[in-house]
Amino acid sequence: MSGYRMKRAARLALAPSVALLIVGMIVPLATTLWLSFRYYNLMNPALGGFAGLSNYEFFLTDPAFAQAIVNTILLVGGVLAITVAGGILLGLLFDQPMWGRGMARLLVIAPFFVMPTVSALVWKNMLMHPGYGIFAWVAMKLGLSPVEWLSNHPLLSIILIVAWQWLPFATLIFLTALQSLDHEQQEAARMDGAGPLDRLVYIILPHLGRAITVVILMETIFILAIFAEIFVTTSGGPGYASTNLPYLIYVQALMQFDVGAASAGAIIAVVLANIVAIFAIRLAGRNLTA
Amino acid sequence: MRSLRPTLFKAAMTFLGWAVALLLFFPILWTVLTSFKSEVEAIAFPPAFWPSGWTLENYFEVQERSEYFGHFLNSVALSLGSTVIGMLIAIPAAWSMAFQPAASTRHVLMWMLSTKMMPAVGALVPVFLIFKSAGLLDTLPGITLIVLVGNLPIMVWMLYTYFKEIPADILEACRMDGATVWKELVHVLLPMSLPGVASTMLLNIILAWNEAFWTLSLTAVKAAPLSAFIASYSSPQGLFWAKLSAASTLAIVPILIIGWISQKQLVRGLTFGAVK
Amino acid sequence: MGSIKLDGLKKAFGSQTVIPDANLEIADGEFVVFVGPSGCGKSTLLRLIAGLEEPTDGRILIDGRDVTHAAPARRKLAMVFQSYALYPHMSVYQNIAFPLKMAGEKADVIRVRVQEVATSLDLLPYLERRPRALSGGQRQRVAIGRAIIRQPAGFLFDEPLSNLDAALRVSMRTEISELHRRLRSTMIYVTHDQVEAMTMADRIAVMNAGRIEQFDTPLELYRRPANMFVAGFIGSPKMNFIEGARAREYDARTIGIRPEAIDWSIDSGKWRGRVERVEHLGAETVVHLSLDTADILTFRTPLDERLVAGRTIHVSPREDSIYRFDGEGRAIPGPKRNP
Ligand SMILES: Nc1ncnc2c1ncn2[C@@H]1O[C@H](COP(=O)(O)OP(=O)(O)O)[C@@H](O)[C@H]1O
Ligand SMILES: [Mg+2]
């Protein structure tokens, strides 16, 4: 095959993927943008027409929106804090010699493979249930009164559930990064008289820098979009206490049928995600040429 | 004495490591154990750790009451369907970008990555409206299509990074040896990147199986895979923990095994190749 | 069957022109070496001939047939890569058989041919092994086996020995020369090592910055280099180049003197200089001398205890081995001495 025909074949091979992504992601996104400037309510088809910025105004002035933004940030921040700190500790721990390390590691990463609806249900019922849950039993054993996790600390509960799901991810990535640490470098540091703490601070943590960035970015992208866990456990409540942005949009669109307002909310969510994505893509881009 | 210290250290680490591991694994273990208890035992307080009867009744009942295996099969169809079709689309794309790069290749890759980073909720409203008018709501083809689109960027990226690792020399040797593009793909490219192809498929199966946003919003009764169906157990009428556990166990065990098998490659897939 | 002609061949990568204008005629059965410093475009030129790169301009003819735009497999050329480029997932047998399989050859024909080739390359005991279970030399032979099995009109080698250790390199060198003697097919061999070039080639194309500076037999290159680049590249240690008054004396901008064409003595000679450094290589000694101007002169001589750093000695170039070059570095033919 000549170079020219080869090139044409290559463009042809790429086309289905690009087309599918355009149809499946870009077109809907553009439509969302368009809808966000329209009056459009599935329950009230008579209403229609250009809405200007009123959908945005409606969404942005809705007290639920401010709360959802705060919740979204708390959720992302809380989960990140737990998983990054915990992941580094666990990564270091499972990098040490131990008997049955491979097996223990399998147990640690297992939560990551549990589907979000299942982990939310298991935590909600069997762990956090104030009457029969394991946490209540532990609290009783310690002489405390059981905590009403989901009613009194809904957001914290969701943070815990999501952190449990994502801690294995962070651990796995940090472990992988630690294993690529140059052993000669470590030995050289020991020859230079560096103790374990020095090695941690001057060699290991800097080495993990890239992995930490990756974990933060990838988790942020996924946790900004957390939905099922809220859907299953608290339905965003009580009130809006555990409603995040995706859930608010979902409620607006599929439960209150206000397509215009939901679309405005979705565009806001996209803009927020974009801010993170820019950093993530830069990072991946650097990786691309390497 | 000299050899005792490392051993002691190892023992301490073993204890600590296993304690942490069991603690993190406990919710899963607890779910599996509870699935073998009677409903009464499941909500016993203080909890009964070990099932006394080891009954399989919950598993049977889950099926009888709710066509559980129908939903299980939906999950299988969704994950296998989106994976196989996805690979058929992603392999040519990755091949094209890895071996016949154009000036735009870098941008295309970046763009694909950026679509994955868009929150799905941004597309929810139009997708819902289109599905509604096209009669795709609560159908397997519909949900398969949308999950496939969602995961396609990850598939292309992963395959791309694996293809990139094949030395250019080998492919040139292959062309010198008279292989056509098709034979090159079949005899050299795919066999050489078999581990990569396999782990890409496994990762996609995991992601599709556990997908919950689209399945919760676009499926209801007929086409609901387990990720959506299980959510129906959150209804407040009564506590059916043993049945919930049986349903959950069936839903997570297959994917847990696949996840364990592919853990190494997963890191790479989920970080778009940034961490290997 | 295997004459190769390059006609005004040009290759640019984007705005960077790597091969400006290559013209070359290689006769059937010839062993030609492309030699030149790293990055001068040897591989690019070879890959153009192989069909792995599209030329920007010009033509390639094999046996008089224009193959400029033909697919690599259509050119009846086989290539041995620096990395060997063996298929890691195939056995040695499958690797060698691959080109025939791609050509749709029958299984029993393939079997016989692989046996033949493997026998000639001493690979019979390893046919079932994977490449990674072979030594460097064995891998090299598998790569050669894969090349010879389809009886190509010509072979292309891109620095095939550079991944081997020194001893193996010498023996593989002989083996490839042997192969050429046996097969009598055209071979083009790329290397940056002038010793490899001088020992193996019928003719050598010396390349510099994408241009073929000279295409000639090894001895002609040594005796009559076309310019300063070739003169400096062929021969080791490098030819000495001297400018200024000493060159003007010979009616040239620059004169070149090979290190082996200089005689020395303690007390009398044409030029006087100070010994800066002495390298004893055993059979011979290489001396670096600074002439009383800033010029450095290197020469080789049999071992002599009197040559020590710091000593002042006299040297004389052999007048009949002085090369003269003009302002553009081109060799000036004709009488060497200024009357
Ligand atoms: N595919 C390519 N794209 C851009 N530049 C290239 C490419 N291949 C080679 N070059 C450039 O062409 C020049 C010659 O390279 P090459 O032929 O590999 O040299 P050699 O084999 O003599 O060391 C180098 O400057 C190199 O950077
Ligand atoms: Mg080269």
Image: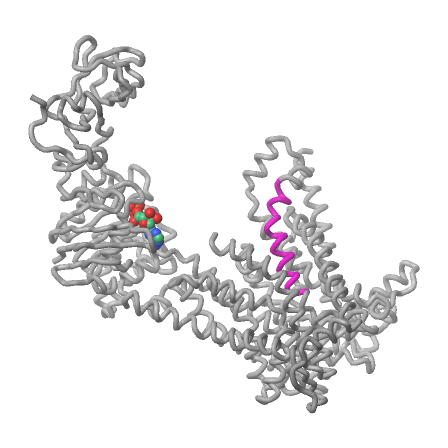
What residue lies at 65% left-to-right and 55% top-to-bottom?
Answer: A171
Q: Residue furthest top?
A: C267
Name the side, left or right, on which A32 lies relative to B177: right
Image x and y of residue C116, in percent: 20, 57
Q: Quadrant of the C terminus of chain B?
A: bottom right
Q: Nearer the viewer, residue A95 or C80?
A: C80
**Magenta span contains residue B157:** no
Q: Nearer the viewer, residue C271 or C43?
A: C271
What residue lies at 64% left-to-right and 46% top-to-bottom?
Answer: A97
Q: Which span of residues is magenta-colored? A: A203-223
Predominant secondary structure in magenta?
helix
Image x and y of residue A232, in percent: 75, 75
Image quadrant assignment for residue A239 = bottom right
Image quadrant assignment for residue A128 = bottom right
Image x and y of residue C311, in percent: 28, 11
Name the side, left or right, on which B198 lies relative to B139: left
What residue lies at 18% left-to-right and 28% top-to-bottom?
Answer: C253
Image x and y of residue C279, in percent: 29, 21
Q: Quadrant of the N terminus of chain B?
A: top right
